[in-house]
Image (cartoon, rainbow, N blue to C red):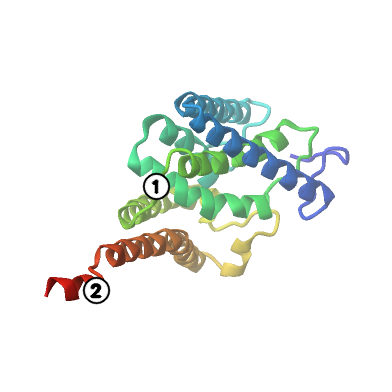
Amino acid sequence: MNPNTTQAFVSTGAMHVTTLLGCAALIAGIVFLGKRSSGRGQARGFTKGLAFFALGLWGVTQTYGFLPAHFEGRSSFPFQWCDVSALIAPLALLTGRRALRAVTYFWAFAFAPVAFATPTLDEGPGHPMFWFFWLGHSMIIACALHDIVVLGFRPGWRDFGINSVIAAGYVVFLLLINIPTGWNYGFVGASTPDVKTPIDALGAWPLRVVWLCLVAHVVFVVLIAPWRLWAWFQRRAVGQEEAPKPSELEGAS
């Protein structure tokens, strides 16, 4: 799609910075309202409202992309990582399924920030895709943070394992689609996006796919490390509190 000058979006430009600030404010507002609803005993209702809004946005976005005037095989199918995340995240909130919550956490914080930093977008505010892109990615982060802050999700090593298996399986699925078609869903195809992304630094295909998987799993480890360290410190603190003091040992002897 070739936007005119009044609609053009330029990455790292003033519009990009302003949009990022707007998305950050939206996400922070959702998390704040979610936490506030929890304090008032209304968390369940707010969670459902957030999830249904995110699902509705996903449905409208996909419907728009499949309209004859906008459909392109290489971009309209909801196979990108964040397309899938935008569907899984609200389903995780609605169902509470652990696997969905795990995938939401890892994919939201591993992939969505890349889209925020280096958006593969050229349409500006005058085009619906601008709003679909930024609102959709904001909802992914908002749902993931809501699950942590309001619903108390804490990822464990089992979640890490489940996510790793699902992510690996999805890469295989994407390769089966990309190789015969020449498409680049999930950035694991032979082609590259029209705009510069961190993927460009990973070299040529197919070795790029291997490096991408390795980098993704390093990020997954980084995302779980703080939680496991915190859990270890908590267990250690509880153990020290339960351990008998020297004075107690002397009195018992």
Residue 242 percent coordinates (x, y)? 25, 62
Question: Quadrant of the rendered structure where residue 36 is?
Answer: top right
Badge 2 crowding class, 10 Å Cα cut-off, few under 14, some 14 to 19, many 20 or more, is few
- Whether residue 79 is visible: no
In which quadrant of the rendered image does the C terminus lie? bottom left
Instruction: Give SS at disc 2.
Output: helix
**Residue 177: assigned label:** none
- Whether residue 26 is visible: yes
In which quadrant of the rendered image does the N terminus lie? top right
252 sits to left or right of 111: left
Q: Which residue is mark 1?
A: 102
Q: Which residue is mark 2?
A: 247
Question: Which residue shows up at 37% across the image and 31% down it?
Answer: 95
Furthest toward the left, the residue is 253
Question: Quadrant of the rendered structure where residue 228 is?
Answer: bottom left
Residue 79 percent coordinates (x, y)? 50, 42
